[in-house]
Amino acid sequence: MSLVKAKTFSVSQCKMPQFIVWSPKLSPQIVSFLSLTYSINYSLRTTEKPLLNSIAFKSIDAEVIIELLMKLTADEFTNKYALIDCRYPFEYNGGHIKLAVNIYDRKKLVDYFYPNDALRFIEISRKIPIFYCEYSKIRGPNMAYALRAEDRIRNKLNYPMVDYLEMYILDRGYKNFYEINQRINKDCCEPDAYIPMNDPRFISDLMNYDLHRSKSTSGTKSKSMKKQWKRKKRKKTSLDPVLEEV
């Protein structure tokens, strides 16, 4: 099966909230409104039943990235794609996808995709971002949404244009990628290992990161936020889009 299978999907370019996630509850009127401006030609084969559905990006399977790494040289791959590992450094250093760049906070994300040097920006903006984290449930998608939000801000006078239109998430993240890579015996991880975020050996390292510490300070903060968010969603009418918290 070919790894490149172009699909065209409608994309939200409206002045509604920027983080809109596909939901079967979206009414036909909203779907139509989200589809008004233009379409994205996704150049890679996308996941038919992804873990996370979003209008901001599409998901790709581990096999797609493995095929790319096997088919392209390192220069060819990095000239076309920006593979972003959104895990913490101890996870990245313990094993990551070849040619991936470790970016785990938003400031570094902005610095990478919007460098001050004009020539560097021209070079990086030609690349297609692919994000992943351990499971590609939270950190990876959130970085993709953060890039789109920054993109919107910088292109507010050129609305609805964006610099990074085609974006992907690695479906089910590095854990799944590593397991598949082990099973088919391809040399696509370096080092060839996987360290979970909650590995007991790295608890002290984990608490060094503001992003994680801020989620853990109150103990039950994240749980209460989820309950609060569920209450908010229940209050919405069928005409309201489901918003993605970042």
Image (cartoon, helix red, strand yellow):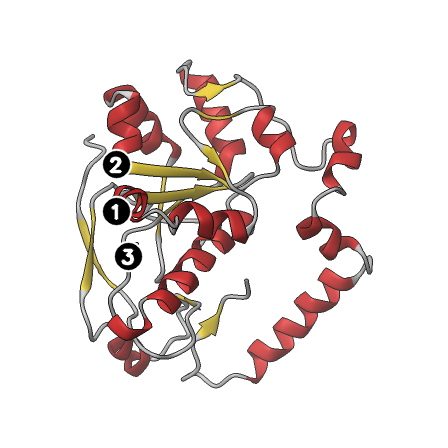
Q: Which of the two residues, 107 or 1, is positioned nearer the viewer here?
A: 107
Badge 2 marks a residue whose secondary structure is helix
Report the residue marked by disc 1.
122
Residue neighbourhood size for the residue with mark 1, other residues' Cα within 10 Å, grouped as few (<14), some (14–19), many (≥20): some
Quarter occupied by residue 23? bottom left
* Residue shown at 42% from the left, 13% from the top: 185
Q: Quadrant of residue 184?
A: top left
Residue 81 coordinates in the image, percent (x, y):
30, 37
Q: Is residue 52 above or below residue 28?
A: above
Mark 3: amino acid:
Asp
- Image coordinates of residue 61 in percent, x first then y, are 37, 37
**Residue type highlighted by circle 1:** Ile
Q: Earlier in the sequence, mark 2 or mark 3?
A: 2
Quadrant of the image containing the C terminus: bottom right
- Checking the image for residue 186, the label placed there is none
Q: Residue at x 39, y 33 (%)?
A: 62
Q: Quickly name the residue at label 3.
A: 163
Q: Position of residue 50 (x, y in %)?
A: 40, 49
- Along the polypeptide, which appears first: circle 1 or circle 2? 2
Residue at point 55%, 24% (across, down)? 95
> What residue do we see at 57% from left, 20% from top?
193
> Is residue 215 placed above or below 158 in the rendered structure?
above
Residue 155 visible in the picture: yes
Q: Which residue is the site of mark 2?
A: 80
Image vertical order of residue 101 relative to residue 118, above or below: above
Q: Secondary structure at mark 1?
A: helix
Mark 2, Cα crowd under 10 Å, few <14 / some 14-19 / many 20+, is some
